[in-house]
Structure formats: C-alpha cells, structure tokens
Image (spheres, rainbow, N blue to C red):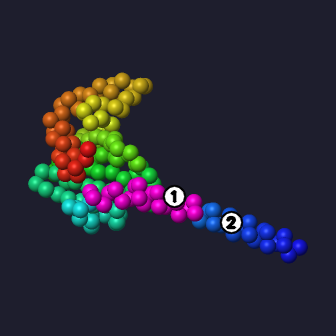
Amino acid sequence: MENKSMSTKKKLAILAGIIATIFIGVNLAWFIGVWMPYNKYTENMELDTNTSNSRSYVYEDKTYIYRLNRPSYLFFNAGFFSVEKTGAELMIFIYPESFEKGYTYRLDSMNTDTGDSMCFFIDSDLKVLSYNEENPEFNDSYKQFLNENYVEISLMLNSAIDFWGLE
C-alpha cells in the first residue's frame, strides 16, 4: 500500500513539474517574442502619464503625436503604434505581427462636427483592405476618403515608419 501512495505522489510531482514547465515556457516565449521587441521603440518616448495604463508611451513633436502601447500580459497581438496629427481627427494604428516581420495598418477618422467616424484597414501602399461585402457604399466611402486624404495619410504613415525605424 505504501508503494502505491508513493507512486501517486511521484505522478503528481511529475504532473506539477510538467505544468510548471509549460507555464514558464509560455511566459518566456511571450516575454522574449512579444514584450522585449518593443524595448527599442520606447527609447525616445516617455511613459504616458495621461493614462493609467503603465504600458503606454507617448512622444509629441510640432506635427504629430506618436503613441505606443505594449501588449497586455500573455496577449500575443495586442500591442500597437499610432500616429496622429496634432489637432486633427485622423489617426493611423500600426499593429506588428508577433514572431514575424510585417504590420497591419488601421486608419481611424472622426469628424467632430458631424460625429461621423470611419475605421478601416489599409496596406503599406495605402490601398483599402477592409471591404463590406453587404454594403458596397462603405467600400466606396473608404476609397473616397483615402483618395481625398492620400497626401496627409502618406505623410503620417511615412513619419511613423521613420520615427520607429519600422521595416
């Protein structure tokens, strides 16, 4: 009987060791692959004191406000960069792909006079990626907005790429 209970204790110890190893492995992979890559991007930025989020950084120059938000604990695709023109109603979000090179770009616009807002994804060549198959009018409005604001959006995106040294 005593050998059997030792066997059960040994199995539980092995199981606990396996669970601890998996937990440590996932945390280590997240820390090295997701959290640490943001270190180089925060060097010229200050912790954003206007938010309670201790993962947010900000830098402001005469033209743009640059923001960086590190991913939350164990979230693999939740960090982002953003750039907005000071006093404007246009913002570009840049989402790095975890563990690989590449970015996803989202364009947000808010008209404070009318309350209308717009949010859609674009590629690095400033082509619309978000399409609403059920409502083609949205697709046309995205393209029209992008065409009307192409120069400003291009300047903002290039400024963000230069500021953070994104590839």
- The residues colored magenta run 21-41
Instruction: Say which residue appears at 27% left-offset and 65% top-offset.
Output: 47
**Residue situated in front as seen by the camera: 106 or 87:** 106
**Residue situated in front as seen by the camera: 83 or 161:** 161
- Quarter holding the C terminus is top left
* Residue 97 highlighted magenta (yes or no): no
117 horizontally vs 100: left or right: left
Amino acid marked by disc 2: Ile
138 horizontally vs 91: left or right: right
Using the numbered discs, state the Cα–Cα distance from disc 2 to disc 1 in whole angstroms: 18 Å
For residue 73, which numbered disc appears in the image? none
Visible in this render: residue 160?
no
Instruction: Say which residue appears at 31% left-offset and 41% top-offset.
Output: 105
Q: Position of residue 145 (x, y in %)?
A: 23, 32
Please identify the quarter of the rendering in which residue 50 is found: bottom left
Q: Name the residue beneath numbered marker 1.
A: 26
Q: Name the residue beneath numbered marker 2.
A: 14
Mark 2 neighbour density, 10 Å: few (under 14) some (14–19) many (20 or more): few
Amino acid marked by disc 1: Val
Q: Earlier in the sequence, mark 2 or mark 1?
A: 2
Visible in this render: residue 67?
yes
Q: Position of residue 125 (x, y in %)?
A: 25, 33
As drawn, the residue found furthest toward the bottom would be 2
| Number of numbered labels in the structure image | 2
Instruction: Say which residue appears at 19% left-offset and 39% top-offset.
Output: 153
The reply to whether callout 2 and callout 1 are in contact (CB within 8 Å) is no
